[in-house]
Image (cartoon, grey):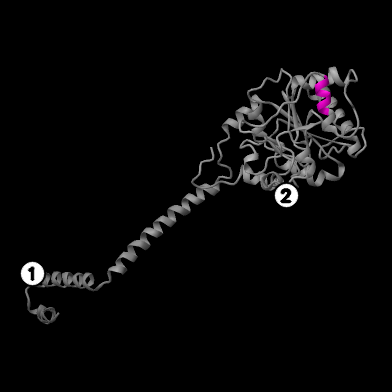
């Protein structure tokens, strides 16, 4: 340092070339002292901050790209199945449920059907709901069902290949239903649902929904209702529907997957996961009322007793929520 100060006091006496040389010496000395006395941690921290800023900006850009697209699931296969497996679903509802349960169906899984119809005891053209000449109440569920099937056969027989009945508190994963039906022939008599057994008679739960082929729809109308072989009113609609199917030659089958897990679930998802079953379920379920996640098929089709708020939750989780870094397909 002392030598530099001496050079600084004498630089005016140097020739121009010497002055230039002295400036270079000053510059080298300054750089030397910065490198010598600056904390290595400060240098490292400075580099880290620069890298973190770069990473943060990159992450923000990626996040913006991800959130700017509302739906990023690849639904190409689902769209192809929608064209191949034409599905009409009709929902049994009541006038008091239109603004709650029926509205939730209409705003969640319902639009994924090829055709969606609502039936009630009163017509409502603004919803819209088709009115049937039948009184409300569990004692008349069979009348509501039989009249709905007659109406569909008369007015919508050629609008679909498969026809499903669901309650207004049933949540249906339509894509899984189409997948289940995709290797089956709708020109043959088929009928599917959650299988119960009562005194050696098997029938499908109405709550989980049941689905029939086009040929089965023809049979129950032309061979069943037209010939007065099927009940057109009464309670226990699901039991009477299966009875009608067997009369016209369409049997029930067990619809569990290859691991014995339910596709159609007649209780809520919470009940099946937790095993909180009512006493009658242990009595009627043909598969022994299995509990937990291993009792539900990975390609489950339906769940019953889904409150409106649960329908919106299920719809968000299934069709919107994504887990970063995990490919669900």
Instruction: Tell me the tag on residue 17.
Output: 1
Q: Residue 134: x, y in percent?
A: 92, 34
> How many residues crowd mark 2 within 10 Å: few (<14), some (14–19), many (20+)?
few
Closer-to-camera residue (252/37): 252
Instruction: Report whether residue 308 is seen.
Output: yes
Q: Residue 61: x, y in percent?
A: 47, 51
Closer-to-camera residue (82/2): 82
The quarter of the picture where residue 57 lies is: bottom left
Q: Which residue is drawn at the image coordinates 20% and 69% (left, top)? A: 31
| Separation of residues labelled 1 and 2 (CA atoms) | 86 Å
The quarter of the picture where residue 82 lies is: top right
Task: Tell me where the magenta segment starts and ends, as one range.
Answer: 241-247
Instruction: Tell me the tag on residue 190.
Output: none
Closer-to-camera residue (281/268): 281
**Side of 311 where 58 appears, left or right:** left
**Side of 182 where 74 appears, left or right:** left
Quadrant location, the N terminus:
bottom left
Q: Residue 107: x, y in percent?
A: 72, 42
The quarter of the picture where residue 104 lies is: top right
Chief SS of the magenta region: helix
Instruction: Report whether residue 148 is seen.
Output: no
Assign a secondary structure to mark 2.
helix
**Side of 269 where 142 appears, left or right:** right
> How many residues crowd mark 1 within 10 Å: few (<14), some (14–19), many (20+)?
few
Circle nearer the N terminus (1, 2): 1
Assign a secondary structure to mark 1.
helix
Q: How many marks?
A: 2
């Amino acid at each position: 340092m002392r030598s530099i100060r001496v050079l600084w006091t004498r630089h005016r006496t140097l020739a121009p070339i010497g002055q230039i040389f002295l400036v270079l010496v000053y510059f080298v000395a300054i750089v030397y002292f910065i490198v010598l006395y600056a904390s290595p941690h400060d240098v490292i921290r400075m580099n880290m901050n620069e890298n973190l800023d770069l990473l943060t900006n990159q992450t923000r850009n990626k996040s913006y790209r991800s959130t700017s697209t509302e739906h990023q699931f690849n639904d190409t296969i689902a769209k192809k199945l929608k064209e191949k497996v034409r599905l009409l679903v009709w929902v049994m509802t009541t006038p008091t449920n239109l603004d709650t349960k029926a509205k939730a169906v209409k705003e969640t899984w319902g639009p994924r059907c090829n055709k969606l119809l609502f039936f009630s005891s009163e017509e409502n053209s603004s919803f819209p709901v088709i009115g049937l000449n039948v009184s409300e109440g569990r004692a008349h569920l069979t009348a509501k069902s039989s009249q709905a099937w007659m109406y569909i056969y008369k007015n919508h027989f050629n609008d679909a290949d498969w026809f499903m009945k669901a309650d207004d508190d049933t949540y249906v994963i339509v894509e899984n239903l189409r997948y289940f039906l995709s290797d089956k022939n709708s020109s043959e008599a088929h009928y599917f649902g959650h299988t119960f057994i009562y005194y050696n008679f098997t029938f499908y739960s109405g709550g989980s929904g049941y689905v029939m082929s086009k040929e089965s729809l023809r049979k129950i109308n032309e061979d069943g209702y037209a010939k007065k072989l099927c009940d057109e009113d009464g309670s226990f609609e699901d039991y009477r529907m299966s009875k009608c199917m067997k009369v016209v030659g369409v049997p029930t089958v067990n619809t569990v997957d290859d691991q014995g897990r339910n596709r159609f679930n007649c209780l809520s998802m919470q009940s099946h996961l937790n095993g909180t079953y009512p006493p009658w379920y242990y009595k009627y379920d043909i598969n022994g009322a299995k509990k937990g996640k291993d009792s539900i098929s990975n390609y489950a089709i339906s769940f019953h007793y889904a409150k409106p708020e649960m329908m919106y939750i299920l719809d968000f989780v299934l069709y919107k929520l994504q887990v970063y870094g995990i490919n669900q397909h």
